[in-house]
Image: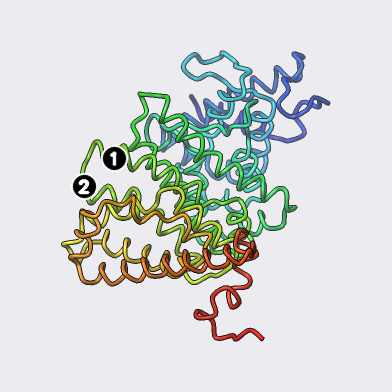
Amino acid sequence: MTIDLVRAALKYLRVDRMPKSNVKPGEVLPKNRETQQAVQFCYVFYVATFTCYMNPSLLEATIEEVIPLIDELCAWIKFFTTHKLAVYMPRPGVVVREHRTAFLVHTHLLYNLIEMDPRLFRAFLDSNAFIDLLLHLWMAMDDKGMPYMGITHSRSSCPLLFVLLKTLEDGDGKDIFLDNLLTRQHHFITHFITATLSRVHQITFITDRDENIEFEQAMQYINNLVQALTPLLTNSTLRYQLLKLSYIQVFTSAFNQFFLKAWAKFGPNQEIWHESILQPIVSLSLFFEDDQDPRVIKNIGDMVGGGLLTVLVNALANSCQDDKSDTVDMGLTMLDILACHAVYPSISTQVSLESIPTTLINKICMNPTIREAWSAFEQNVRDGVVSYARFKSSRFTLCDNPLVCASITFLVYPAHSSTTPH
C-alpha cells in the first residue's frame, strides 16, 4: 500500500459521490455502476485505513489530509452500514451484503481510526457527524430486534462499546455526546436506552446458550456497559428515562445469574464479588442513594426481587473479617441504600429474610459495623411489612401501587415523616 493509493482513496471521500437511491435503510442497493463504484471505494478506503493503522509512518504522512475529511468519512460509514455494504477482509475483494458483517467491519474500522492517534480522536470529537454515526450504530438492530455485538475475543471484539466508552470518558466527548442526545426527540432517547438494555438481555441469553463464551467475559462486557451508563446517569433527564425502563432491575438480574456461576467456579473469592458484581451494582445505585422518587422505589424493589440480597450477603460473608476490604465498603453502602428505602411496602414485601441462611447472617454480624447496618435494614423491612399488613386489613389498596404509595409516605408512615396529617 502506497501513500498515493491512500491519497487517491481520500479524494474519493466526498458525499456527493454517494449513490443516489430510493431504497430504504437496511435494503440492499441495486447492482448498478454507481453502487459498484461505492463498493470499490469501500474496499480501497478500508484497506488504506487498515494499512495506516498497521504502518505508523504511512499514517503520519497522510493524517493532515484525513482530519479535514472526518465528516465525510463518518457519512460514508453510516451509508455503508445502512445499506449492508462491506468488504470481507480475510478474502480481499469479496463484497458482502449482510448487515451483521457490514456492521462489525465498519465498527472495527471506526475503532481502529480512533485508537490510531490522539489527533484523529480529537478530530472525531469535534465532528457532529461522528456523534450522529455513533448513535446510529449503537441503535442498529437485526431483524429480531437485537443489537449487533460480540464478546468472544479481545477488547476490540465489540469495538463499538469501546468507541462509546472512550467518547464518554473524555470530558469534552461526554458533554458533546450528551448535548447531541438530549436535543433529540423523546422517542429517540427511549430507543437509545432500550438498545443499551437490550445488550444486557442479549449477553445473558448468549452466555446461557453458548459454551464458548465464559461468563467472566460476559460480566466484563456488562461492567463496561455500566461504565458507559455512569456518566449518563449524572443527567437528570436520562436518569429519569433509565429509571422508567427499570434499568437497575435489568442489570441486577444479570448479575444475579452470573453470581451463581461465579460461586460454583470460584467459591469465596473476594475479588470476583468486588470487581465483577458488587462494584457495578453500587455504581448504578449511588445515583438514587437518598432519592425518594417513586420510580426509584420501584427500581429498588425490582433490584431486591432480582436476587440482590443473595449476592450481597454472600459477598459480605466472605469478606466480613477484613474491615479494610473494598467489598465490605461496597456492601455497607448497598445495605445503607436498601435500608433507607426498605420501609416502602413495594420493597419490604419482596424481601424474604427467612430465605437467607442463618449461618450467613451470623457470620456477617460478627463484624460490628455490618451488624449495625444489617439490623437497621431488618428493622425497616419489618416496619414496612407491618404497615402494609395494617393497611391491607383496613381495605386500603394504595400501597399496592408503589408510584402512589411513595407519594403519600406521610400518611402511610407517619412515624417516618415530620408532617402530621389532619
Q: Badge 1 is on which residue?
A: 262
Going from N to C along the chain, the mark reached first, 2 or 1, is: 1
Q: How far apart are marks 2 and 1 (CA)?
A: 9 Å
Where is residue 309 shown, x and y percent of the image? 36, 54
248 with respect to 98 (left or right)? left
**In the depicted view, which residue is nearer to us: 97 or 2?**
97
Rendered residue at 47%/47% (across/down): 251
Q: Is residue 339 above or below residue 254?
A: below
User: Is any atom of residue 336 visible in this view?
Assistant: yes
Question: Neighbour class for label 2 at 10 Å: few (<14), some, many (≥20)?
Answer: some
Rendered residue at 33%/31% (across/down): 214
Q: Is residue 413 above or below residue 83?
A: below
Q: Are marks 2 and 1 in contact (CB under 8 Å)?
A: yes
**In the depicted view, which residue is nearer to us: 350 or 60?**
350
Where is residue 115 shown, x and y percent of the image? 45, 43
User: What kind of residue is marked 1?
Assistant: Ala
Where is residue 357 shown, x and y percent of the image? 26, 51
User: Is any atom of residue 172 visible in this view?
Assistant: no
- Kindly give the residue lying farthest to the front in the view shown: 393
**In the depicted view, which residue is nearer to us: 69 or 292?**
292
Q: Badge 2 is on which residue?
A: 269
User: What kind of residue is marked 2?
Assistant: Asn
183 with respect to 240 (left or right)? right
Q: In this view, does 309 lie above or below 31?
A: below
Rendered residue at 70%/17% (across/down): 36
**In the depicted view, which residue is nearer to us: 153 or 110?**
153
Question: Neighbour class for label 1 at 10 Å: few (<14), some, many (≥20)?
Answer: many
What SS does tag 2 mark? loop
**Count of residue discs:** 2
